Image (cartoon, helix red, strand yellow):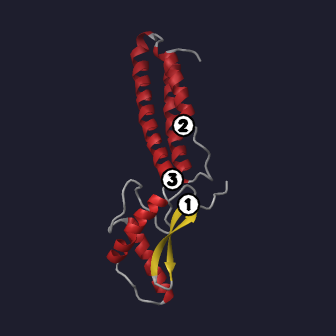
Amino acid sequence: MDLDAQTVIQAIQSYKSQILAVDRKVQLYLSDRKSHRYPQHEELATEIRRFENRIYNVNFGFSNTEVHMRLDGLMHSLLVYEQAWKRMFERDADAYQQMRVSPAACTDPEEEPHESDPFVDKVFSYAQQKWEAAGVEATESKEALAKRLLPAFKAAKRKLKKGQKLSVVYDPESRQVKLAIRPKVPSVG
């Protein structure tokens, strides 16, 4: 690469575009790993840092200030996106390590569910569907279901081992939904 100011500015703009493209690839990859390739975000960050190290100490004369300001902007953008990517991958890793509750899942793995939590809402909705399909009246209120299931949920969560998931099942004899620990089905692909 020729090291004139205009060429370096074009390279900086190209890297900014690549950061945006990789950000989209990270989001797509985390949304569906089977359909999308690994985004190579670490490699891009390494490449940009090498570029910065090569360029930062070059004197571009009159254009020096503009080049360095744009380079600083590029590095700031990279830092912001790297932090966001790190958080997205950490959340994704936490979600894989947390149990998978079917048909309901906790929205935030850091929070324990409570009576107004989406976990309780989804489990109660699931129970209502099962009661309706069985042609029986609801056997418990949403609050009663939350009081019964939340302690079982917390206890089961502690007992969960690697390769297991937590599922919600309907017991037709007692007409209640219960939690069951089951082995995870390995994903294909």
Q: Which mark is on residue 41? A: 2
- Kind of residue indicated by mark 2: His
Q: Which mark is on residue 3? A: none
- Determine if residue 14 is in view: no
Distance of label 1 from label 3 (alpha carbons)? 10 Å
- Determine if residue 109 is in view: yes
Q: Which mark is on residue 97? A: 3
Q: Quadrant of the N terminus?
A: top right
The residue at the point 32 percent across, 67 percent down is 116
Number of marks present in the image shown: 3
The image quadrant of residue 139 is bottom left
> Relative to residue 165, is residue 52 depicted above or below?
above
- Local SS, label 2: helix
* Image location (x, y in percent) of residue 59: 46, 10
> Relative to residue 163, is residue 27 depicted above or below?
above
N-term mark: 1 or 3: 3
Q: Which residue is mark 1?
A: 164
